[in-house]
Amino acid sequence: RESALQQADEEEEQKLFQSKAKRTSRAIAKSGVNSETLKQQKKKNEAEEMIKNKRTVFVGNLPVNSTAQMLKSLFKEYGQIESIRFRSVVPAEDTLSKKLAAIKRKIHPNVKYINAYIVFKEECDAIKALKKNGTEIASGFHIRVDIASKNSLHDNKRSVFLGNLSYDISDDAVREHFADCGDVVAVRIVRDRQTGMGKGFGYILFENTDAVHLALKLNDSALQGRKVRVKRCVEKGSAARRAAGQPRG
């Protein structure tokens, strides 16, 4: 579970990119282009996407009534914005596509938070936009801002894993519960892509390691009627190595 957290917010974007790449591959295949040309086109698409992701920021924990204009106003000071797209939108009706639901703002009433991707004209502007991480843009909504090409808001030594969370818990409820431990850089609740509801686990990234020690003392503390599990974040592969009795490299 802990290792899955590192990709939780990137899953949707990766799947969208993979789907786009597959569509491109099929289109090229239908046109009768040989396999070598197909491979070259695929590599070109992946390279272009990687470059684009470096100038794209992920913005999480946005109110459902957020608009592209609102985000432009919030981030325009950092540079020219090329495009904005919303994600984690659950349509109010099954007949609506996610894109149409986002445009018409017909979002399922159980969904309280949505995410967005902002593409800047220049990579340096996307990096400057990270200054907005942790900003409270509305009551109870501290946004999470990260570069789309990498999960920079993750550091095992400064993070704790949270389990047995309420499925409808908000990022800010978690932030408030651990506020006395130290400065919180980011809260990430892993949510179901289809319903927008939490999956019962997530993690917190603190400003320093001292806060982690204090947070661990809140293991089994009551949070929205549940005893929350607080554990150290485990690096990928380390748990498997310990289970197999292998020393660290």
Image (spheres, rainbow, N blue to C red):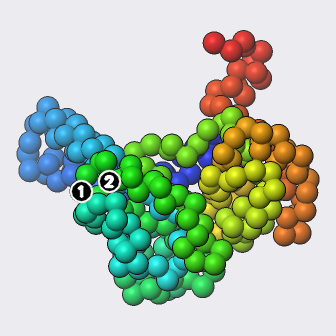
Between 61 and 210, the one lying in front of the other is: 210
Q: Is residue 92 left or right of 23 when viewed as pictured?
A: right
Counting from the top left corner in percent of width and height, residue 237 is at: 64, 27
How far apart are the two marked residues, 1 and 2, measured between alpha carbons?
8 Å
Residue at the image point whose x is 40% and y is 45% from the top: 149
Q: Residue at x 50, y 44 (%)?
A: 151
Q: Which quadrant is home to the C terminus? A: top right
- Front of the two marks 1 and 2: 2
Q: Percent x, y for residue 98?
A: 42, 75
Residue at the (61%, 38%) spot, across then down: 155
Left or right, 59 with respect to 83, comes to right
Q: Which residue: 65% across, 69% down?
A: 197
Residue that protrudes farthest toward the front in the picture: 77
Question: Which of the pair 80/193 is nearer the observer?
Answer: 80
* Residue 224 falls in image quadrant: bottom right
Q: Please indicate, yes or no, whether residue 144 appears anywhere in the rendered image.
A: yes
Check disc 2 and report its element: helix, strand or loop: helix
Residue 99 showing in the rendered view? no
Q: In the rendered image, which residue does mark 1 sit on?
A: 121
For the N terminus, the image quarter is: top right
Q: Amino acid at mark 1?
A: Lys
Which residue is denoted by mark 2 in the rendering? 125
Instruction: Give residue 104's position: percent from left, percent from top.
Output: 39, 87
Q: Cβ–Cβ below 8 Å for labels 1 and 2?
A: yes
Q: With respect to residue 244, does 152 lie above or below? A: below
- Label drawn at residue 193: none
Disc 2 marks which amino acid? Asp
Local crowd at mark 1 within 10 Å, few (<14), some, or many (≥20)? Answer: some
